[in-house]
Image (spheres, rainbow, N blue to C red):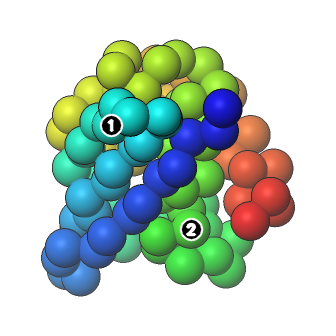
Amino acid sequence: MSAQISVTRVDGGDPLAFDVCVREGKSETRHHVTLSQRDFARLSGGAAAEELLEAAFRFLLDREPKESILARFDVSVISRYFPEFEDKLASYLDRR
């Protein structure tokens, strides 16, 4: 079953801030995620910030269950746990 990911921007400053809800079946997790303007410009490849966040979560969900994803984090920390994140992100953005 594919997860449904909803991304809502809650702050448009620097960093950008989002609430992300991941639903699978009847269960869901909620996450508060930040993204610096600098990282957004570097990683987005022209995608909207919400699309970048959805792609980042699809990347994470391919590697761990939604319950293992931190409740609060900045996108920059993903590479600490998964060094291949930035190299693989473009392929997830291409799936949109």
* Residue located at (54% from left, 31% from top): 60
> Vertical placement of 57 versus 79: above or below?
below
Residue at image mark 2 = 51
Q: Earlier in the sequence, mark 1 or mark 2?
A: 1
> Residue 96 location in percent, x, y?
74, 65
> Vertical placement of 56 versus 19: above or below?
above
Question: Looking at the rendering, in which quadrant would you find the N terminus?
Answer: top right
> Residue 52 location in percent, x, y?
55, 62
Residue at image mark 1 = 28
Q: Can residue 64 be seen in this view?
A: yes
Q: Which of 50 and 14 is in front in this view?
A: 50
Q: Distance between the residues labelled 1 and 2?
A: 19 Å
* Residue located at (72% from left, 60% from top): 93
Question: Badge 2, how many Cα within 10 Å: few under 14, some, many 20+?
Answer: some
From the viewer's perspective, tell me whether residue 21 is left or right of residue 84. Answer: left
Q: Is residue 36 visible?
A: no
